Amino acid sequence: MIKDVILYLEHDKSRDGVRDYAISLAEAFNAHLTGVAFADSTNSLISLMAEFSSVRIADLLTTEQEVARNAIERFEAAVKGRHLSVEHRLVMQSAVGALTKFSAMARRYDLSVIMQSGDEKCFNNDKIIESTLLESGRPILVVPYIQTKELNLDRIVCCWDGSRAAARAINDAIPLLKKSKAVELLIAANGTTAEEQVNHGVEISSHLNRHGISIDVEIVQAEDIDVTNIILSRVADTSVSMIVIGGYGHSRLREFVLGGVTRGLLATMTVPVLISH
């Protein structure tokens, strides 16, 4: 069940597509939606202390608080008049910083919605995505920065390799899969593990069938092409509206390290991606 959704609100108005997508998702599931905006400069201000005066730092903080409030105001305007349970939170400052704070908040929700980093990293959300994925214990839905349409569940592709992360992602996606018109299990088979992967695919398909979800299984040989390109090619060829994938990675020395497929997909995605770790 998806009944409680948290949204990472963007400061820049040009990126409000994620807000509209999250609203449509909450409406589809009759879920409560919490929009969170951060004006938390704790970490960045520390790095600026030696370079800027206290007056300059105060001006920067005031500006950040203003744009965060504007994001809240746009969120409130967007949900006004809708039959939707909503609330907003403005985080002015926290001792742990936005990354840790949002990840901790996300633990109390069914799903987090975050926008992909912008073109050429002009709006860099990589760290908030990685932190929430690896530290919240909850699934996240990453929305492309080019997204203009609301929630579309016509065709969902679930990437399957028999791993723990893939199993977790597919299980977390069940509420979405039940509403989808078509669900595909995509298996990238390679070499000696191909037969085993196919058998696992049959088993997970049977599991989903018992949930009332009909599955089409697509097996693609992985030789000579990487998994990220296989997924993206499948999206382009079959008009996929969402991808479900297990997120691989770990936290190490306060840095978050994602696996190659996860990082590659997040950099090149053209449709929303649900990821679980």
Image (spheres, rainbow, N blue to C red):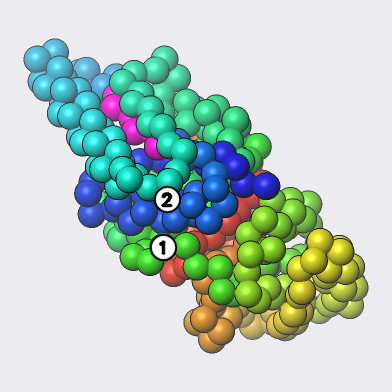
What residue range appears in magenta? 35-41
Callout 2 amino acid: Ile
**Could you give the CA–CA distance between mark 1 and mark 2, rounded to whole angstroms?**
8 Å
Q: Amino acid at mark 1?
A: Glu
Farthest residue, direction bottom: 237
Q: Disc count in the image?
A: 2
Hey, which quadrant is residue 163 in on the image? Answer: bottom right
Residue positioned 63% across, 69% down in the render: 180
Residue 267 visible in this rendered orientation of the protein: no
Q: Nearer the viewer, residue 123 or 150?
A: 150
Q: Residue at x 41, y 24 (%)?
A: 97
Q: Is residue 239 above or below residue 271?
A: below
Q: Earlier in the sequence, mark 1 or mark 2?
A: 2
Q: Is residue 105 left or right of residue 114?
A: right
Q: Nearer the viewer, residue 174 or 115?
A: 174
Residue at 34% from the left image edge and 18% from the top image edge: 93
Quadrant of res 191: bottom right
Q: Is residue 119 above or below residue 11?
A: below
Residue at the image point whose x is 87% and y is 73% from the top: 202
Q: Which residue is mark 2?
A: 23
Dot 1, how many residues are within 10 Å of its Cα: few (below 14), some (14-19), or many (20+)? some
Q: Please provide percent x and percent y for residue 76.
A: 30, 39
Q: What residue is disc 1 on?
A: 150
As helix, strand or loop, the secondary structure at mark 1 comes to loop
- SS state under label 2: helix
Residue 125 percent across, percent down from the top left: 39, 46
Q: Nearer the viewer, residue 36 or 225?
A: 36
Magenta stretch: residue 187 in it?
A: no
Residue 62, position as x, y percentages in the image: 16, 23
